[in-house]
Amino acid sequence: MAVDGIQARLATRFSFLAAGFGLASWAPLVPFAKSRLDVDDGTLGLLLLCLGVGSVLAMALTGMLNARFGSKPIIVVTGLVMAIALPFLAVASTPFTLGAALFVFGAGLGSLDVAMNIHAVEVEKASGRPLMSGFHALFSIGGFGGAASVTALLSMGLAPVACAIISAAVVAAAILLAWPRLMAFKPDEDGPLFAFPRGIVLVLAILAAVTFLTEGAILDWSALLLTGAGLVSLSQGGIGYIVFSLAMTAGRLVGDAVTVRIGDFRTVFWGGVVALVGFAILLLVKAPVIAIGGFVLIGLGASNIVPVLFRLAGSQKTMPSGLAVAAITTTGYAGILVGPAGVGAVAHVVGLPVAFWMLAGLMSLIPLFAHTVTKSSSGG
């Protein structure tokens, strides 16, 4: 391979940064889109679903494309597609055009997500040391940067379309910087184009879905959980997700060093245990500061589970690694999409605290299956 390892790692970080920045840049623009189209919350929800549908469909397709062309061209093309689609989200004037733009934007994001994780697995294999947590930390940092920069620009009086164009330029620049540094891994031309997750890959996919589901549920429901329990005021409801996301980012920044020191098994097992302790503190303690500390423990505990799961998907022999990573990414993203709605349905029947106890029950699968998924890993 013509590209050296340092350059390939830099390119992978650029890819994760671009994906996180692009996705988060859309979030502050959502209220403007709702106002521009003059739609109700129900219609907006259906439109936002277009992003998720585009992502999931593209994720399933990317595994097949990677088997034939490798991850490099997919990262470049889909990253630029996402950048090009972003300004259209700020100018779409009808529900149809916004839905179409969200579908394309989501497809670019979903395909980029799979391809960059496949590339990350290969770069990590070539380096011979854990790197996945650091790559995923760049996605979180990009997310913070995207949301913060667009919010700041809007506060300065810039029009939404100008903010979107600036964000698109940042995403495109990151992808173009990554382009010559990406490794052109040889695709498996004799392998299958598609395979359903099976064996250990199915277990990995389920654990990824549970972890992503938890992250999505905390994003959508943590404020209501805190305010409903009288722990914080309405204006402070977002503090739970803020401390959760900061803890997750911090955990991922040190995650590779931690994994080198304690191995994949202990990283997954104790990560799951710490997250469960966080849930218990959050749901049982009535002192606001301590209860909110539960979100810190959930974020720290969950931070390195998904990176390890991706690494294990790349090293298992049940399926081609590219298809395994695609399966885990698709299943995990489905967890983010479906999970929060499921939490809402359960909360409607038995209350939000019970729904969060059920999330904790699902998270208990992580330590229970930690040995199963890591027993073939040399890091375990």
Image: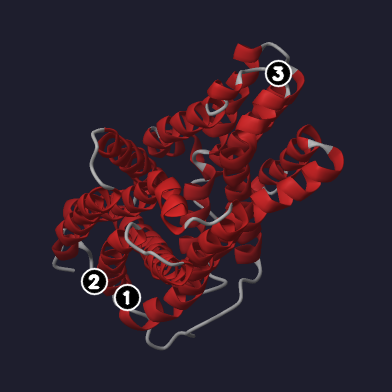
The residue where tag 3 is placed is 230
Q: Residues within 10 Å of mark 3 (few under 14, many from 20)?
A: few
> What residue sits right under mark 2 in the picture?
184
CA gap, disc 1 to disc 3?
51 Å
Disc 1 is placed on an element classified as: loop
In percent of width and height, residue 149 lies at 28, 38
Q: Residue at x 65, y 18 (%)?
A: 291
Q: Position of residue 180 (x, y in %)?
A: 14, 64
For the residues marked 2 and 1, what is the alpha-carbon distance in whole angstroms?
Answer: 7 Å
Quarter occupied by the C terminus: top right
Q: Which residue is mark 1?
A: 70
Residue 81, compared with residue 345, is above or below; it is below
Q: Quadrant of residue 200?
A: bottom right
Which amino acid, by three-letter code, is at mark 2? Answer: Ala
Q: What SS does tag 3 mark?
A: loop
Of label 1 and label 3, which has the lower sequence position?
A: 1
Give the distance between the C-alpha atoms of the residues marked 3 and 2, in whole angstroms.
54 Å
Left or right: where 164 falls relative to 188: left
Q: Which of the two residues, 9 or 163, is positioned nearer the viewer here? A: 163
Closer to the N terminus: mark 3 or mark 2?
2
Q: Position of residue 230 (x, y in %)?
A: 70, 18
Front tag of 3 and 2: 3
* Image quadrant in which the N terminus is located: bottom left
Task: From this view, report whether residue 220 is shown above or below residue 128.
Answer: above
Q: Earlier in the sequence, mark 2 or mark 1?
A: 1
For the residue pair 366 and 228, the one nearer the viewer reads as 228
